[in-house]
């Protein structure tokens, strides 16, 4: 009996040893699962965006800055700053492109030109015969609301040599002034300036570049290069007179512009003075106006005491931005005045057939 009890106790102990691991396995598995879930929860708490897909970006033309296409992640608490954009940081450190530099330069030039008369005022000349004559065709077309085409014909000072930008040539400035005065009109100013030309070369292109374009008005700047090249003023005057007659035969109004006052011209003082006189005589013979550019610029220097470099560039011949601007404004004022007089019946030619042969 004693032996039987002994074996029963051993059997029970053995059974307990075998049953304990099986009973504790689910507990360990549950604890391990809870630990895993707890760790995952910790990871999600620290990095909430770690499992989010990357937000697609779109690039604007010419830019490297990324722009989000999805706005779902842009809302942030008021006290939380948005994360730094490394792409934007890199762009801020990059040097400006050549295009950006060019745009900035044009902007600076435009700003400087916009207040050009604020730095040096453009005053009207005193006592100079400032008249561009009668402009009946331009006045009629403006009154009728018809398009007006003006051709600026000449050499390098018409072309715009010496300006800091093509926008600051005298034809472009004149066009802007006339458009401001007549905002509803369709006015076009065409630049037909060729550097180095004077009457002999201009007569060769008069038909194709001027008359064939059927302009309503021709502003003919001539005589400067003829003075520098010591051409005979009387011979130049005869060519200009023939050219004016051909332009008038096409029905266009004509204004002549004599040489500029600058060191390279005034060093030929005798020839320059004679050129101014013979061009004035052509204006009288053909009944067209002559804008006295030489006298206007002389007054800038002698009457207003402006240094030459205020209106002439370093080559001693061509005007700078201020010179072209004041020249264009003074010429434009005369054109506007002449058109206004014709509209009022003050400066109407007695015989259009005489003044503008058809």
Image (cartoon, grey):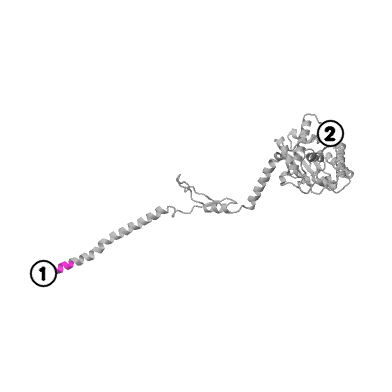
Q: Is residue 203 visible?
A: no
Please state if 191 lies on the left or on the right of 51 as rendered.
right
Q: Is residue 99 visible?
A: yes
Q: Give the total number of marks visible in the rendering.
A: 2
Magenta stretch contains residue 155: no
Residue shown at 52% from the left, 53% from the top: 86
Where is residue 348 shown, x and y percent of the image?
A: 81, 31
Mark sitting on residue 2:
1
Residue shown at 68% from the left, 41% from the top: 114
Most foreground residue, 164 or 343: 164
- Please identify, in this view, whether the residue under mark 1 or under mark 2 is nearer the observer: 1
Where is residue 243 shown, x and y percent of the image?
A: 85, 42
Q: CA distance from mark 1 to mark 2?
A: 157 Å
Please state if 66 lies on the left or on the right of 214 as rendered.
left
Residue shown at 38% from the left, 56% from the top: 40
Q: Which residues are magenta?
A: 2-11
Magenta stretch contains residue 4: yes
Instruction: Give the vertical position of 5 relative to 194 (above or below).
Output: below
Most foreground residue, 160 or 344: 160
Most foreground residue, 329 or 93: 93
Mark sitting on residue 352:
2
Compare marks 1 and 2 and give the one earlier in the sequence: 1
Mark sitting on residue 74:
none
For label 2, the SS is helix
Residue shown at 31% from the left, 60% from the top: 29
């Amino acid at each position: 009996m004693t032996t039987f009890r002994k074996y029963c106790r051993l059997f029970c102990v053995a059974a307990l040893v075998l049953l304990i691991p099986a009973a504790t396995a689910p507990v360990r598995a549950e604890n391990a699962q809870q630990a895993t879930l707890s760790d995952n929860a910790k990871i999600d708490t620290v990095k909430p965006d770690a499992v989010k897909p990357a937000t697609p970006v779109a690039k604007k033309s010419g830019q490297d800055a990324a722009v989000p296409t999805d706005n779902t992640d842009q809302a942030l608490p008021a006290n939380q700053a948005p994360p730094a954009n490394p792409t934007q940081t890199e762009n801020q450190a990059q040097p400006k492109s050549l295009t950006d530099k060019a745009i900035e330069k044009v902007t600076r030039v435009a700003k400087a030109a916009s207040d050009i008369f604020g730095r040096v005022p453009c005053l009207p000349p005193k006592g100079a015969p400032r008249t561009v004559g009668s402009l009946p065709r331009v006045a009629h077309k403006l009154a009728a609301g018809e398009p007006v085409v003006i051709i600026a014909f000449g050499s390098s000072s018409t072309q715009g040599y010496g300006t800091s930008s093509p926008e600051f040539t005298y034809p472009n400035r004149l066009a802007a002034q006339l458009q401001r005065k007549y905002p509803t009109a369709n006015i076009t100013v065409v630049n037909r300036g060729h550097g180095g030309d004077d009457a002999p070369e201009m007569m060769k292109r008069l038909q194709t570049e001027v008359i064939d374009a059927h302009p309503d008005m021709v502003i003919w700047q001539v005589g400067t290069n003829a003075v520098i090249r010591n051409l005979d003023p009387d011979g130049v005057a005869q060519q200009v007179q023939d050219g004016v007659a051909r332009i008038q035969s096409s029905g266009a109004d004509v204004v002549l512009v004599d040489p500029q006052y600058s060191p390279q011209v005034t060093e030929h003082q005798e020839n320059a003075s004679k050129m101014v006189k013979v061009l004035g005589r052509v204006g009288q013979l053909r009944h067209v106006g002559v804008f006295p550019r030489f006298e206007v610029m002389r007054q800038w220097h002698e009457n207003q005491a402006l240094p030459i470099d205020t209106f002439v560039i370093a080559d001693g011949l061509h005007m700078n931005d201020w010179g072209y601007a004041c020249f264009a404004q003074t010429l434009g004022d005369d054109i506007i005045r002449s058109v206004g007089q014709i509209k009022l019946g003050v400066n109407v030619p007695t015989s259009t057939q005489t003044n503008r042969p058809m």
